[in-house]
Image (cartoon, rainbow, N blue to C red):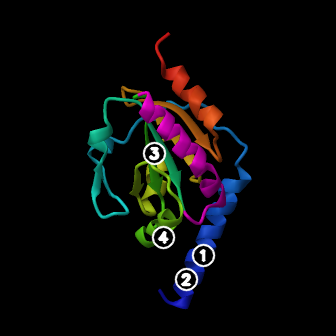
Amino acid sequence: MNRRQTLAFGAVAAMAAAAGTGVGLWRQPTTSALLPANFWQLKFSRPDGTELAMADLRGQPLLINFWATWCAPCVRELPAVAAFARDQAANRGVRVLALAVDGAAPVRSFLQTQDLQLPVALAGMEGSDLSRQLGNAQGGLPFTVLLDAGGRVAQTRLGETNLAELAQWAKALEPR
């Protein structure tokens, strides 16, 4: 990347981070957003070079956290998302996917310093479009969406989330 491209990318990253921070405390209402028609056919690269197929996650509740290494609120909330993933895995509950709206090299570098212990995949900048299709009208980060077992959007959150909120979402999916 030349200096001009680096500066342009940095400016875009700063604006996106500012947008995410500015709405960090704002909660989006539960939405009835529909999944894109090809959602379950999507495939994403993982930082280790393998592939993640969304079809493998179909049929059970799924929490997708859209994040980026350059997004401070995203980085702050990742430990809570990872803790939620561990809790849910122990109880065979909600599956969790951290979907990076970022490049492979920064994500690999980040993961060398953080032991998240949850599935991470790379959506690149196209992840912004996907998050919008799932209810993120502002396109900011972090953005978290919970799909129920039928693949319907059950909850969305623009801005930082926390373990207690995620646990409430999972509990709301349980049969009464």
- Amino acid type, callout 4: Ser
Disc 4 vs disc 3: Cβ atoms closer than 8 Å? no
Contact? badges 2 and 1 (CB < 8 Å): yes
Identify the secondary structure beneath mark 4: helix
| Distance (Cα) linking label 3 and label 2 | 28 Å
The mark that comes first in sequence, 4 or 3, is: 4
Mark nearer the N terminus (3 vs 2): 2
Q: Looking at the image, is mark 1 or mark 4 earlier in the sequence? A: 1
- For label 3, the residue is 133
Foreground tag (2 vs 4): 4
**Residue 145: x %, y % from top left:** 51, 39
| Distance between mark 1 and mark 4 Cα atoms | 17 Å
- The amino acid type of the residue labelled 2 equals Thr
Q: Which label's residue is closer to the chain start, 3 or 1?
A: 1
Nearer the observer, disc 3 or disc 1? 1
Q: Which residues are magenta?
A: 69-91
